[in-house]
Amino acid sequence: MIFKPAPLGFAKLDRDTLVEDKKHCKKIGPCGVGQKALYLNSFYFDRRYYLPYSSITRVYKRIAMSKGGFSGKGTFATIAYLVVEYDGGQEKQCIFKYEEQVDQLLAELEKTQPQIKRVSAEGEKRLAKRAAEFAAQRKPELSPQGRKNVDELQRAIDYLDKKPELALELSQSAQRKRAYLRSSPSYRWVAMAITVIGLLCLAYGIWGLVNHGSYAIFITLLGLAAIFTFSGFSVMPTSRNNKHFVMKRAENAVKAMEAYIADYPDFPLPARYAHPVVLRRMQRAIEQGRAAWPGEALEVVKNDLKALNADVKVDQEEYDEVVAIKAMFLNEDYR
């Protein structure tokens, strides 16, 4: 280990345990999930710090939106953070380039460290309020068949929860596909062109510094600025950001889900929509008396998603649900 991670909190691991744990930790973005500790990045270095799980109170996602990000135009996007609360009130915030990596890390913690809360204190209050509102919307008493249908959907949710990575990949690949299809190809090539110009400026600036000095430093800095700026955007055409890769990833996610639910008799959803959030919304539709059967409940979910657009205001939890599943339905034209 070239750089030994530094402890963030009061608790520490002995050197041998730390070396072994970091060596075998699951690397997700700039952070890592070990057996003994969570590894967090600094501004410059990945997995520069660590926190033993006994120190951690909460780990959750925070999203920042650049101005104009919800317009659906340009290269604006969300900025995803992993927030870790530890030692009775301390907080560490880690920036991620890809939001899906934050989701993957939280899913890994859900499997390996279920005792750690994965929502903020404010989020817990909102969830409790939302649960109370849903309870108030339920019919006073479900029919025996209605209760049986709700229980059937719950069994399907429990089955998907055994392999949460499949539903996560189904959602993330659908979002990536939707974003790729909606973005203008010109953005990608403009970003590529500016980055190439930045590389040329950088090369010329270094040559100028070596041979002449003078204004070469400014050309070098200009080149570096262009490279770092556009390498941070997910618009440049690369080996993992092109039509073939994006479409194949979405196709493979559906195939993986198809193979998994093939062992479940009469799964209530087609593989392309097999996500716990869809099933939970179907449950609510039946409990609220808006549907009687799973097939009808799915149509209610589709109609609710169609009604949600940029002009509709929703709470954070509703937004998270919609973001997780709407791209799957849009890509399939709600069929």
Image (cartoon, rainbow, N blue to C red):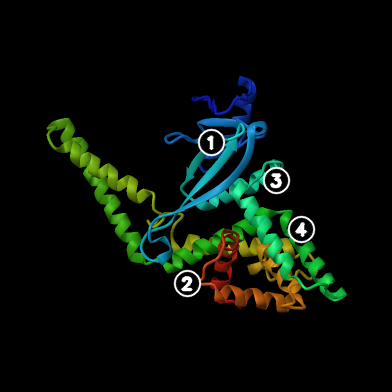
Distance, label 3 to label 2, CA atoms, is 37 Å
Q: Is residue 121 above or below residue 285?
A: above
Measure the alpha-carbon separation of dots 2 and 1: 37 Å
User: Does residue 109 sit above or below 149 in this rendering?
Assistant: above
Which numbered disc covers residue 40?
1
Residue indicated by mark 2 = 311
Depth-wise, is mark 3 or mark 2 nearer the camera?
2
Label 3, label 1: how far apart the Cα atoms are: 19 Å
For the point 50% across and 46% down, the residue is: 81
Spatial distance from mark 1 to mark 4, Cα to Cα? 31 Å
2 vs 4, front mark: 2
Could you say which quadrant of the image residue 168 lies in?
A: bottom right
The residue wearing badge 3 is 111
Q: Which mark is residue 229?
A: none
Q: CA distance from mark 3 to mark 4?
A: 14 Å
Provide the secondary structure element on which disc 3 rests.
Answer: helix
Label at residue 158: 4
Residue 263 can be seen in this image = no
Q: Position of residue 333 (x, y in %)?
A: 55, 77
Q: Earlier in the sequence, mark 2 or mark 4?
A: 4
Examine the rendered structure and indicate whether residue 231 appears above or below residue 313. Answer: above
Secondary structure type for disc 4: helix
Seen at 47% across and 70% down, the residue is 310
Amino acid on which disc 3 is placed: Lys
